[in-house]
């Protein structure tokens, strides 16, 4: 079947299912999409260009090497004005022809592709090469129209070939699979390249090349690019598991051995399947469709558990590999629409939509009962993509409402003065200082197409295929004659197996004889998500004996408890980050009975830690609402197990902040006249959190914020914890107390020093600015006609992501338990050596551990006598010790935030 007919047949099958949205309302939403795009694009051009990306919180460009490294995520940046290149064809689709022409001239004048920098082959291919090819396609289309781009002489195509040639050295492997990284100037061989030593790559990284490379070959007449892309796909196909017909997530580029044998449709594999089907659509080679259909049958047999899509083992496909899903699989319903399998697409999309409504955005990963697994959301467009394709296939206005929800959430929660900021934590509404190029390349394309009528588009999109980065490649490339080299890879009819071939596409009109059919599919899924998130029952193993010291009663500052631990062979080690570590040597116990008590104590501590991880309180939010922040800056804070429960407060606690004196808050507050009616700022250390709370409450404070004294600590690099009580009743504490790490606390202190009066809102999560300033004019610019209604569904919180082992320990073994100051946290038994728990094993901000007291060496130092100047500075809301960062502005402190662990890096870790 010709590929053009394939698309027209599928997308022409529109049917009215319910009351349609009026054209006037669709026009309003379409115009709002354009306004949102303008806000993002213009801020990039004004504040970031020629840098690769915009940092929307600090209003400046992200230049690789000048900002703190974010690890693998920075491999997309090559000092080639990434966002501008990635946005070229979006400008044309949104009818911004003048801006497109200016952007092309800027690219031609300013962008260099020969930088001595190591970049990701995958990201550079889909974003830069794809962006240049999409821009070239648009330029040719406009030039042929006779009104615009008449000066254009294929300059973007020449740049595309240049970057293609710079990527080619990565394919110089025995397998044909590309190295994951390449130096744009020096390739992959030689010491100057600083790359070429990698042995593994992800399946999607090697299998998401064919569209761009084949288009480059067809545009230029040089077959070398298409040949290399086909060779990589052929190798992956040969290495599939022959019984399950599934592929793994990570493969050795030299031996072809699967490094990670889990298989799904999300991160690491996603676009490999997408490009098999779209390669058939673009190139007309039946072999690609046959391979896709074989894979697809296995996906639906093993991975698809409607509405869920769960990873399995390629050798044992009936065995689940994990119990959570990542947000990248949200593209799959859109691919199922292209395949013509509408029913499972509706079901999975509905599940994703309900998760989106529950958390405002799709968390980077979420569990099978729809709890947050990884809380970040970098403004990914995959859900919008599937929403658009389902609307095209069904004509159901329900998907227009889904698109409206996406837009409203972006405006309410992600929009900042300098663009749109990624969500650091969907539960609290805190932001990351990043706006990835794919946000402009993809999100606004799909939203615009969702609401625009066909006669409002500058060209017929059905004449193009979308790449995984939503770049537009013309279907006319399928008619370009192949060179002799490429034709060697062309499949003959004899090679095809008709038993595994689906030659036709279903007519979607026949799938929906009843207009209520899609709604009937969606209702059970909506109910399942709504009823999710039960609180897990505390686990207690029947018949378990208890040692003389109960784990739940243990306190690290109690001498009697420490002596009991010593007798049981358990020692306590203070770590630099404020945690304490429990280590048991059974041979050091005073008796065999005491050793057994020690083993039971350690096991009970493990059990208690596991239980507390399930029952942990979620992070809280501190939102700066005074001038010039107006609610746009949200700091992630740790909760307390006492005082006001902010999750039960509809309004939170709002007030101006002031620094308590003494700053440690461990004795009676001497500046009570300043603290009364305010939210007191305190420094961590020297006494229990509950004691600090009692002192500021007595002084008349309405809330408190404890700031870590460990310089450099940040919620980006350390897990938040719960502040526990002091071992006695805390019912007398009625105000809210929150905890900030040093970096986030310094942002608040610097704001206080610069603006003197700083008002904050303490709440369970960031509030909509419209709700904060209810009844008052909204500061700054907000989207006109934005909807102020917010979902009232209770947010599901993170549960433990890694099971904890509690196997018995013999007398020749040693057990290790790490705590946050006398209370159980992550617990891991060790056999030979004592080592701190690796903080990289869980995304920052997701796990909330327990902290009872502060006993680090810094905290045990005696108070330093204050000078008169220091006392005056405290009275003027400037704590002593804050002068270390006095030369830094608020913007600089915001910029100093380290990024969360990139989801892809985490996904590359084998969690089997």
Image (cartoon, rainbow, N blue to C red):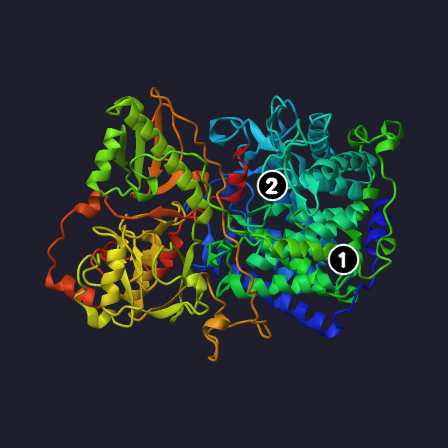
Residue in view at x 59 percent, y 66 percent: 408
Look at discs 2 and 1 and give the one toward the viewer: 1
Among all residues in the image, which is located at the extreme front? 543
Res 605 → quadrant: top left
Q: Is 548 situated above or below 769?
A: above
Q: How many marks?
A: 2
Q: Which residue is mark 1?
A: 520
Residue in view at x 75 percent, y 38 percent: 296
795 to the left or right of 761 = right
588 to the left or right of 454 = left
**Which quadrant holds the C terminus?**
top right
Q: Residues within 10 Å of mark 1 (few under 14, many from 20)?
A: few
Q: Say what secondary structure mark 1 lies in.
A: helix
906 to the left or right of 527 = left
Q: Are marks 2 and 1 in contact (CB under 8 Å)?
A: no
Disc assigned to residue 874:
none
Disc 2 to disc 1, C-alpha distance: 30 Å
673 to the left or right of 219 = left
Among all residues in the image, which is located at the extreme top? 812
Residue 380 position in % (x across, y down)? 59, 52
Residue 267 position in % (x across, y down)? 60, 41
Q: Which residue is mark 2?
A: 267
Asked whether residue 219 appears in the rendered view, the answer is yes
Asked whether residue 69 appears in the rendered view, the answer is no
Q: Is 168 situated above or below 522?
A: above
Residue in view at x 34 percent, y 55 percent: 740
Q: Nearer the viewer, residue 375 or 79?
A: 375
Residue 818 position in % (x across, y down)? 34, 37
Q: Nearer the viewer, residue 115 or 348?
A: 348
Q: Say what secondary structure mark 2 lies in.
A: loop
């Amino acid at each position: 079947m010709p590929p053009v007919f394939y698309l027209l047949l599928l997308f022409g099958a529109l049917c009215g299912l319910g009351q349609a949205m009026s054209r006037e309302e669709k026009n309003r939403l379409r115009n709002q999409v354009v306004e949102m795009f303008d806000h993002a694009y213009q801020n990039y051009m004004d504040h970031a260009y020629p840098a690769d990306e915009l940092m929307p919180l600090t209003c400046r460009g992200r230049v690789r090497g000048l900002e703190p490294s974010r690890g693998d995520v920075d491999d997309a940046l090559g000092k080639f004005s990434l966002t501008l290149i990635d946005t070229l064809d979006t400008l044309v689709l949104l009818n911004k022809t003048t801006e497109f022409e200016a952007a092309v001239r800027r690219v031609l004048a300013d962008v260099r592709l020969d930088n001595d920098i190591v970049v990701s082959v995958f990201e550079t291919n889909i974003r830069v090469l794809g962006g240049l090819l999409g821009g070239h396609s648009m330029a040719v289309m406009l030039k042929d129209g006779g009104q615009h781009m008449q000066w254009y002489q294929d300059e973007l195509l020449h740049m595309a070939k240049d970057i293609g040639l710079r990527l080619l050295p990565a394919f110089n492997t025995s397998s044909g699979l590309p190295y994951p990284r390449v130096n744009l100037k020096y390739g992959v061989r030689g010491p100057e390249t600083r790359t070429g030593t990698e042995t593994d790559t992800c399946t999607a990284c090697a299998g998401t090349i064919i569209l761009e490379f084949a288009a480059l070959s067809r545009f230029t007449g040089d077959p070398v690019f298409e040949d290399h892309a086909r060779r990589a796909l052929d190798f992956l196909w040969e290495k599939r598991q022959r019984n399950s017909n599934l592929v793994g997530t990570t493969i050795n580029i030299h031996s072809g051995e699967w490094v990670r044998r889990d298989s799904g449709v999300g991160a690491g594999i996603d676009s490999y399947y997408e490009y098999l089907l779209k390669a058939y659509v673009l190139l007309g080679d039946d072999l690609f469709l046959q391979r896709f259909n074989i894979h697809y049958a296995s996906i639906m047999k093993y991975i698809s558990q409607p509405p869920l899509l769960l990873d399995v083992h390629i050798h044992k496909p009936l065995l689940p590999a994990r119990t959570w899903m990542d947000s990248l699989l949200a593209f799959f319903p859109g691919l199922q629409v292209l395949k013509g399998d509408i029913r499972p697409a509706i079901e999975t999309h509905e599940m994703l939509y309900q998760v989106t409504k529950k958390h405002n955005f799709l968390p980077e990963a979420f569990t099978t009962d729809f709890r947050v697994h990884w809380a970040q959301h970098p403004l990914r467009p995959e859900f919008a993509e599937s929403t658009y394709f389902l609307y095209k296939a069904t004509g159901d206005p329900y998907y227009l409402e889904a698109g409206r929800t996406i837009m409203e959430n972006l405006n309410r929660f992600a929009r900042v003065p300098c663009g749109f900021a990624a969500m650091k934590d969907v539960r609290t509404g805190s932001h990351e200082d990043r706006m990835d190029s794919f946000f402009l390349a993809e999100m606004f394309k799909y939203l615009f197409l969702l609401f625009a009528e066909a006669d409002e588009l500058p060209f017929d999109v059905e004449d193009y295929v979308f790449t995984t980065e939503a770049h537009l490649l013309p279907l006319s490339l399928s008619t370009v004659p192949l060179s002799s080299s490429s034709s060697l890879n062309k499949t003959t009819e004899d090679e095809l197996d008709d038993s595994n071939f689906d030659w036709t596409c279903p007519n979607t009109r026949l799938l929906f004889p009843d207009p209520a059919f899609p709604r009937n599919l969606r209702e059970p899924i909506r109910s399942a998500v709504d009823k999710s998130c039960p609180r897990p029952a505390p686990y207690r193993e029947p018949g378990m004996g208890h040692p003389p010291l109960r784990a739940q009663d243990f306190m690290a500052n109690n001498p009697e408890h420490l002596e009991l631990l010593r007798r049981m062979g358990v020692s306590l080690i203070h770590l630099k980050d404020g945690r304490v570590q429990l280590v048991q040597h059974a041979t050091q116990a005073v008796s065999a009975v005491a050793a057994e008590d020690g083993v039971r104590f350690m096991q009970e501590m493990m059990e208690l830690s596991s239980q507390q991880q399930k029952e942990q309180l979620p992070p809280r939010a501190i939102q700066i609402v005074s001038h010039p922040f107006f609610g746009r800056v949200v700091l992630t804070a740790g909760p307390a197990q006492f005082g006001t429960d902010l999750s039960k407060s509809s309004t939170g606690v709002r007030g101006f902040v002031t620094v308590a004196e003494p700053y440690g808050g461990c004795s009676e507050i001497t500046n009570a006249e300043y603290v009364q009616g305010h939210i007191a700022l305190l420094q961590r250390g020297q006494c229990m959190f509950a004691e600090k709370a009692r002192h500021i409450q007595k002084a008349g404070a309405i809330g408190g914020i404890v700031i870590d004294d460990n310089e450099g600590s940040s919620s980006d690099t350390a897990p938040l914890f719960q502040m526990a009580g002091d071992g006695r009743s805390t019912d007398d504490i009625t105000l809210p107390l929150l905890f900030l790490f040093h970096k986030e606390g310094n942002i608040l202190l610097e704001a206080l020093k610069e603006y003197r009066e700083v008002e904050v809102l303490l709440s369970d999560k960031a509030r909509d600015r419209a709700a904060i300033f209810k009844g008052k004019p909204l500061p700054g610019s907000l989207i006109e006609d934005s909807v102020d209604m917010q979902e009232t569904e209770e947010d599901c919180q993170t549960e433990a992501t890694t099971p904890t082992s509690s196997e018995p320990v013999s007398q020749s073994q040693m057990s290790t338990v790490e705590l946050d100051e006398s209370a159980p946290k992550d617990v891991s038994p060790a056999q030979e050596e004592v080592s701190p728990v690796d903080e990289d094993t869980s995304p920052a901000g997701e796990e909330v551990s327990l902290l009872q007291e502060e006993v680090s060496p810094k905290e045990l130092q005696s108070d330093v006598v204050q000078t008169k100047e220091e006392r005056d500075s405290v009275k003027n809301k400037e704590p002593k010790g804050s002068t270390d960062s006095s030369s830094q502005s608020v913007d600089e402190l915001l910029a100093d935030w380290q990024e969360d662990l990139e989801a892809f890096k985490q996904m590359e870790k084998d969690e089997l």
